Amino acid sequence: MEKQYKMIITDLDDTLLNSQKKISKIDLEAIFKAQENGVKFVLCSGRPTFAMKSLAKEVKADEYESYIISFNGSIINDFKNNKNLFEASLEKEDLHLLYDFSKKYNTHILTYINDEIISETDSEYIDVEVDLTKMPHRKVKSFKEFVNQGAVKCMLLAEPSYLKEVEIELKKEYGDKYSIAISKPFFLEVTKLGIDKGVAVKRLATTLNIPIEEVIAVGDSFNDLPMLKASGFSIAVENANPEIKKQVDFITKSNDDGGMAYLIEKFIFNKN
């Protein structure tokens, strides 16, 4: 007898979203079909909650009473009722410490306050985040002076090969203090210790009384790995990082080739 999966949790960028940053028609139709058959469909991203709402609306997360997991697992949001089931933040002192680290290693740094992106600097990499999230970018004279409260996440940004070196140093110094993961090659994301997509997926599954064995997770990058490892069945898109593809149960088609529709037909409706 085929296993019946009750929830699909998916990353957004380079996974559900195609190269045009949209959900393709074939994928959207399959998502609706799955939800009509009682499968929960959950968006899970490093993006801020604000930057996920239009996509949640598009997949009818309100109509199907679903959830969004934002900031790499720092927030679980009941989308229909616009209520956070869970929220974990970095303290102001954490953000200041990470700012000092960013200066030491000459990277850009940003955080999110009141639905704005906050940074001291401009950068092509910050521009990517602004474009992805559609959030206002507030450039401030002094990061430390402006950031006088906690925030759920901050991000260090630099050229990818250098950022991998920075990640090693950050984990050496503060790996016991924060959750640290690369999402896009030029985004190094930092959240509260013990917070990641995997922890959030387990928390949501428990809340909904869905056995974790009946959860499918779909991703493409290193910040997806905890979610992929936590779930009952892990899937990477064909365009995923090669290191991620080595660690999953199945590889679906690419984000530009109906990868979500393909896996839904195969594993929800058991069509080979």
Image (cartoon, rainbow, N blue to C red):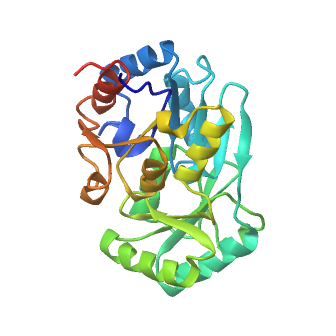
Residue at 74% x, 67% y is 91
Q: Quadrant of the N terminus?
A: top left
Residue furthest to the front in view is 1
Residue at 23% x, 43% y is 238
99 horizontally vs 266: left or right: right
Residue 125: image x %, image y %? 41, 61
Residue 120: image x %, image y %? 58, 70
Residue at 62% x, 22% y is 62
Q: Quadrant of the C terminus?
A: top left
Q: Can residue 143 be seen here? A: yes
The picture quadrant where one finds residue 82 is: top right
Residue at 56% x, 44% y is 201
Residue 168: image x %, image y %? 43, 79
Residue 222: image x %, image y %? 40, 59
Tell which of 144 and 224 is nearer to you: 224
Q: Is residue 196 above or below residue 25?
A: below
Q: Can residue 50 be seen here? A: no
